[in-house]
Image: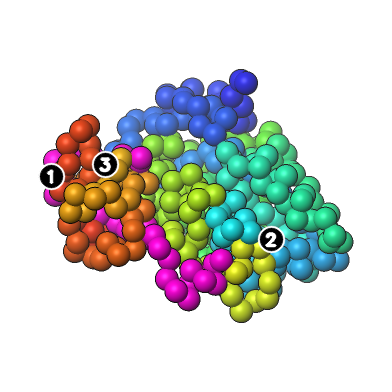
């Protein structure tokens, strides 16, 4: 099957993007280089094409009841123009996906889901929707999305809009504002650990907005950014990535995001297994580690403690902000203590590592 292209495909090529296939899409892995783009987001600003992400509308009389059944977090607590992060689970407690819920108004929501999971999530939602008075719409192909991230992001965006960005707090959105002459939804969320905004627009407006943002931001140090630094940025702040720290076989509680599983909101899919994991403690946990020996851990490498296999690396990378080789691993809970020494098997050798606190990086300091 041919990989899909976002509306910005030709723009990426023009900016020197090195294209790779990711989740069935042709996307830039880097432009000037992962390390340079990473540091740009940490110190100035970066612009990402995230048009491959999926969008689903949820409306109707029982929209809230449907969402409360579907996801683990408490959607009832959302006010209008507010955003909620939540896992979505199978009856076994394993994860279907993690997503954002945008409450547009009473009975009207927008869900933002991971690109590689669009078809699977859509089919799952249709299955769960049976028996609810709810209307679902898969509007993924009718929506493009840009992410502007970094400490100078607000300054860049302010050049293109009269919207009061200083009044837009974290995990809130403006449903329709003028940005560079186009009407877009602007939210203040992100996947990098820095301040930032998402701009949702029509696909045929994406190039115009990209160019306007680059023109406004280049004097401030804005760089176009690819998937490579998107991953190193989210990894440093220990945000889970579906297929790595979350999966059908890894629950939100095991992944360390049990705070987004609200057991007091009423019944939801996966409620009982997740309740048991929260009350008794999970048998496995995602931990952070730093390499003590020279070597870079990668996803899938085995983790050993005292000669026994204790788990598996879910993500491993060099950290540009901290200048260290770090990793995340799913290990047996009995070994998940900060300071504990591990061995990571890299190319047939067991190299020393140590469990450290998460997140590795915090905004405004290390």
Q: Left of 319 or right of it: where is 116?
A: right
Residue where numbered disc 3 is placed: 297
Segment tinted magenta in the rendering: 273-300
Measured as percent of width and height from the top left, residue 258 is found at 48, 67
Q: Which residue is drawn at 46% across and 30% down?
A: 28
Measured as percent of width and height from the top left, residue 290 is found at 21, 52
Image height of 339 relative to 350, above or below:
below
Image height of 328 relative to 144, above or below:
below
Residue where numbered disc 1 is placed: 293
Circle 3 SS class: loop
Q: Which of 162 and 172 is in front in this view?
A: 172
* Residue furthest bottom in the image: 264
**In the picture, which quadrant includes the C terminus?**
bottom left
The numbered mark, 1 or 2, whose residue comes first in the sequence reads 2
**In the picture, which quadrant includes the N terminus?**
top right
Q: In which quarter of the image is residue 340?
A: bottom left
The numbered mark, 2 or 3, whose residue comes first in the sequence reads 2
- Do callouts 1 and 2 mark residues in contact (Cβ within 8 Å)? no
Q: Residue 40 carries which label?
A: none
Cα gap from disc 2 to disc 3, whole angstroms: 35 Å
Q: Which of 233 and 210 is in front in this view?
A: 233
Q: Left of 5 or right of it: where is 314?
A: left
Residue where numbered disc 2 is placed: 70
Residue 362 in view: no
* Residue furthest top in the image: 2
């Amino acid at each position: 099957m041919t990989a899909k292209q976002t509306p910005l495909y030709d723009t990426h090529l023009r900016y020197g993007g090195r294209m790779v296939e990711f989740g069935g899409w042709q996307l830039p892995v880097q432009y000037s280089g992962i390390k340079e783009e990473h540091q740009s987001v940490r110190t100035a600003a970066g612009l990402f094409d995230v048009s491959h992400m999926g969008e689903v509308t949820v409306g109707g009389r029982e929209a809230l009841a449907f969402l409360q059944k579907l996801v683990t977090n408490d959607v009832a607590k959302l006010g209008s123009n507010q955003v909620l992060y939540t896992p979505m689970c199978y009856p076994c407690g394993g994860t279907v996906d993690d997503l954002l819920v945008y409450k547009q108004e009473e009975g009207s929501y927008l869900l933002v889901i991971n690109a590689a999971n669009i078809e699977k999530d859509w089919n799952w939602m249709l299955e769960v929707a049976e028996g609810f008075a709810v209307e679902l719409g898969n509007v993924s192909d009718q929506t493009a999305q840009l992410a502007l991230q970094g400490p100078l992001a607000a300054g860049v965006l302010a050049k293109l809009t009269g919207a009061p960005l200083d009044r837009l707090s974290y995990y809130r959105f403006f449903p329709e504002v003028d940005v560079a002459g186009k009407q877009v939804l602007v939210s203040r969320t992100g996947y990098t650990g820095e301040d930032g905004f998402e701009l949702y627009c029509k696909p045929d407006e994406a190039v115009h907005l990209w160019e306007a943002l680059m023109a406004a931001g280049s004097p401030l140090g804005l760089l176009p950014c690819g998937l490579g630094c998107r991953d190193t940025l989210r990894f440093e702040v220990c945000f889970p990535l579906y297929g790595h720290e979350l999966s059908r076989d890894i629950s939100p509680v095991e992944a360390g995001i049990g705070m987004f599983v609200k057991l007091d909101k009423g019944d939801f899919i996966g409620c009982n297994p997740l309740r048991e994991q929260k009350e008794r403690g999970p048998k496995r946990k995602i931990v952070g580690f730093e390499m003590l020996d020279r070597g870079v851990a990668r996803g899938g490498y085995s983790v050993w403690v005292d000669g026994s296999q204790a788990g598996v690396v879910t993500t491993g990378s060099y950290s540009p902000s901290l200048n260290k080789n770090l990793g995340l691993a799913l290990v047996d809970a009995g070994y998940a203590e900060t300071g504990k020494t591990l061995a990571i098997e890299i190319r047939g050798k067991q190299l020393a590592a140590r469990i450290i606190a998460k997140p590795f990086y915090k905004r405004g300091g290390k």
